[in-house]
Amino acid sequence: MPVIIGRRELIAAPGSAAAWPLAARAQQRAMPVIGVLDTGGVDSNTGFLRPFRQGLGEAGYFEGQNVAIEYRWADGQYDRLPQLAADLVQRKVSVIAIPSSTPASVAAKNATTTIPIVFGVAEDPVRLGLVTSLGRPGGNATGINFLARELDTKRLGLLHELVPTASRIAVLANPTDPVRVTSNIEVVETAARAIGLQIHVFNASTTDDIDVAFTAILRERMHALFTMPDAYFGARRVKLAILAARHALPAAYPLRGYVEAGGLMSYGTSLADAQRHVGIYTGRVLKGEKPADLPVTQPTKFELVINRSTAKALDLELPPTLLARADEVIE
């Protein structure tokens, strides 16, 4: 004779079907949550997500399997960063990861002194107030300093070596970046004076601004273009490369992605390697290591990438000494 279980017994029975959804929800709540914060937009950041996720995987974490990720994009609007960082803090994420953004890292640090932060920044994190020292961060933040600011001097020298007749250099900068724009331009101006170049700054923070800036660059008869490191410009690297080519303007960029899009030359850190490192450190923090005990690292790999096709279109003769030092020459 079949056993009939009443409704009350069904609800109370341990391991019953009714208890499964509750157990599933409890398991889901137990999954750690990473908050990813960036100055760009979701469409422009698929590039950094790949190496960041690779680093997470090397640390044993896989999105949707044993870790969840909440993404917050500023879409190039730097003034939104404090609100987005505060939202991640309010959601009590396990760690805030910023794979490659100095302004986003500063916003996260200003938003919390308790939630762990793993950053990728272009400037000195001690000067920014993110850590006490590189070797002993001493607070809730650590990560990688990929030295973009320091490399600007080297990049300007390489542009001068590639186009020695160019003495009037247009510097494209984003004035809405509150952290970097002034100090970085000062570095470039100092480097320019040392090698006899004239620097003229052109500001742009929107697509229309970029068009206006290029019109002004042509009107002022600039000889070459030097693009400052900026997430907004990186997301529009194809447009910048096209405009430089259209107006026969030799240009130097901070990252290889510009050259892959048709730009002339780039020199900088291997950003993918830095973003991967942020993923690894994020995984280590999830496993219980404290940011205060994880030293800030600096890259040892830098890339000089040249686009030979663009050089030919600009009727530029590539110096053999420069080609010999190039990590990659794109045909």
Image (cartoon, grey):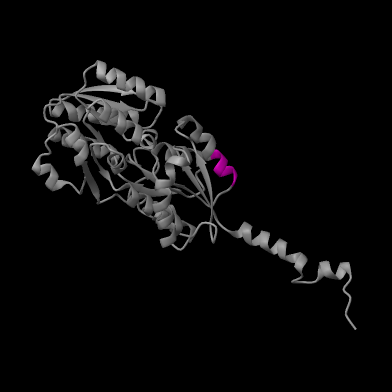
* Camera-nearest residue between 87 and 11: 11
Indicate whether residue 87 is drawn in magenta.
yes
170 left or right of 92?
Answer: left
Q: Quadrant of the N terminus?
A: bottom right
Query: Up-down: is 177 above or below 290?
Result: above
- Rendered residue at 22%/41% (across/down): 307
Part of the protein shown in magenta: 86-91
Closer to the camera, 40 or 182?
40
Q: Is residue 269 visible?
A: yes
Q: Is the residue 157 above or below the residue 27 in the image?
A: above
Residue name at image x 29 percent, y 41 percent: 255
Query: Is 309 within the magenta?
Result: no
Q: Percent x, y for residue 164?
A: 11, 30
In the displayed structure image, the side of residue 237 where residue 304 appears, left or right: left
Number of residue marks: 0
Horizontal relation, residue 125 to residue 25: left or right? left
Q: What main secondary structure does the magenta stretch of the protein show?
A: helix
Quarter that holds the C terminus = top left
x and y, in percent, of residue 286 in the image: 49, 58
Q: Residue 156: where, in percent of width, then height?
A: 20, 33
Is residue 138 visible to the viewer in this orientation of the structure?
no
Quarter of the image where one finds residue 251: top left
Please, which residue is most extreme toward the left here? 320
Relative to 65, is 94 above or below? above
- Residue 126: x %, y % from top left: 34, 41
At 53% from the left edge and 38% from the top edge, which residue is drawn? 84
